[in-house]
Amino acid sequence: MKLNLKSDNQNIAAYLIKPEGFKYPLPALIFIHGWKSNSEGNIKRATEISKLGFICLTLDLRGHGESEGSIDQFSREDHLQDIKAAYGYLSKLQEVNPNKIGIIGSSYGGYLSAVASNFLEFEWLILRVPALYFDDNFNVPTDRLINEDPRAFKTSNLKTQNSLALKGVSNFPGDILIIESEKDDIIPHPVIENYSEAIPDKRLLAYIIMNGAGHSLETKEQEKEYIEILKNWLKEKSSKLEVEV
């Protein structure tokens, strides 16, 4: 179901997928795409994940896809507000258990998801090839930051106290899944290490490397593998879901 949510009085396009055959209220997941991407791929993934008994919400960050604005207008703070708007919408749905909402983000979306965990109560945190950046200039348009320094989101030597993203994973009380691509030419391995090392209780962390995959999932086989990784991990975390007879 297509939705039109509001973030700072601007329209953000979203898509809601509800499963059938499960007792409400259900757990929910928010899907966040990467930089200069959109929710198209996430809609396909969310459709598959919803079969496990999750209500799924995908959205186009402002300046992306069908959402309002030009990409050069919006900062990380703006996109954080988009995630807050999506969370607020989901948490108020009668069909959703507000205490069981997770977030899945890739690349820039993974970074934003980690940042958002400082401000929103998530049950699960899934980061695929997450970017990483200093907190400096958080209100400066992201496009400008990247144009001024192409390495901006590849920072690999941050301390937890200097990064909202690392603070987010460090303080996260729930389960975390980090997925790395073996042949990622955008996000180097030390960035992924920075995230995993920031998590004090390694019992909460699942870390998976997709062999042969690049930053973007370019083949049907890789896409299928990613969906299976998500399904297997979430199935384990949601094993107590009750199916209606």
Image (cartoon, helix red, strand yellow):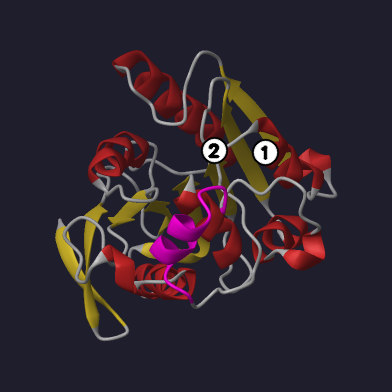
Which element carries disc 2, helix, strand or loop? loop
Per the rendered image, the range of residues in magenta is: 140-152
User: Residue 230, relative to residue 199: is it above or below?
Assistant: above
Residue 129 tag number: 2
Q: Which residue is mark 1?
A: 192
* Residue type, mark 2 in image: Val
The residue furthest front is 148
Quarter of the figure with residue 159: bottom right
Looking at the image, tell me whether mark 1 or mark 2 is earlier in sequence order.
2
Residues at marks 1 and 2 touching, judged by CB atoms closer than 8 Å: yes
Q: How many residues crowd mark 2 within 10 Å: few (<14), some (14–19), many (20+)?
A: many
Residue 3 screen position, x and y as percent = 17, 65
Residue 242 tag number: none
Residue 237 screen position, x and y as percent = 58, 40
Residue 28 screen position, x and y as percent = 42, 55
Q: How many residues crowd mark 1 within 10 Å: few (<14), some (14–19), many (20+)?
A: many
